[in-house]
Amino acid sequence: MKLLSKEIEKKLPALYSQEEVEDPMVVVKFFDPCGSGTWYITEGERQDEEFLLFGLCYIHEPELGYVALSELQAYKGPFGIGIERDKFWTAKRLSEVKAERGWS
């Protein structure tokens, strides 16, 4: 599965465009089906040869930060399984994601 379709890419706000938005929309969710990594992406854009994403990342604890799409694409976990996109994801506010996961 392609992690970032053209349709999702068009929906992503540009990096830094939501710095003043108190509760941004999470447009896409990526996850490690064999581990604990989950990325709730709120912004993204191409920068030179790389597509840079920003959002709430949860590996050991929730933290806002950046991740390169190429990093997600390159990762191979157990049995060679990589990061996947939640194809059933519906955009929702970051506060909703935090509440669902029990994060304040």
Image (cartoon, rainbow, N blue to C red):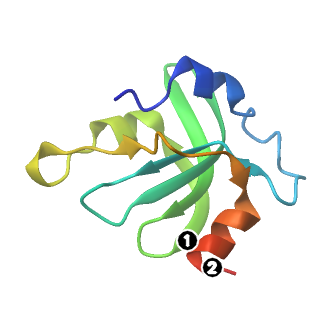
Q: What x and y, as percent, mark residue 37?
A: 39, 61
| Quadrant of the snapshot with the N terminus | top left
Q: What x and y, as percent, mark residue 77?
A: 19, 52
Residue 36 sits in quarter:
bottom left
Whether the residues at callouts 2 and 1 have beta carbons within 8 Å, the answer is yes
Asked whether, in this view, residue 49 is left or right of residue 10, the answer is left
The residue labelled by disc 2 is 103
Asked whether, in this view, residue 77 is left or right of residue 102, the answer is left
Residue at 88 percent of width and 53 percent of height: 21
Q: Which mark is residue 28?
A: none
Residue at 68 percent of width and 45 percent of height: 91
Foreground label between 2 and 1: 2
Pointer 1 local density, CA inside 10 Å: few below 14, some 14–19, many at least 20: some
| Quadrant of the snapshot with the C terminus | bottom right
N-terminal-most mark, 2 or 1? 1
Residue 76 sits in quarter:
top left
Q: Residue furthest front?
A: 88
Q: Is residue 96 above or below residue 21?
A: below
Q: What x and y, as percent, mark residue 97?
A: 65, 64
Q: Is residue 67 above or below residue 70?
A: below
The residue labelled by disc 1 is 62
Q: As shown in the figure, which amino acid type bears the numbered disc 1?
A: Pro
Asked whether, in this view, residue 34 is left or right of residue 13, the answer is left
Element type at mark 2? loop
Q: Is residue 89 above or below residue 59?
A: above
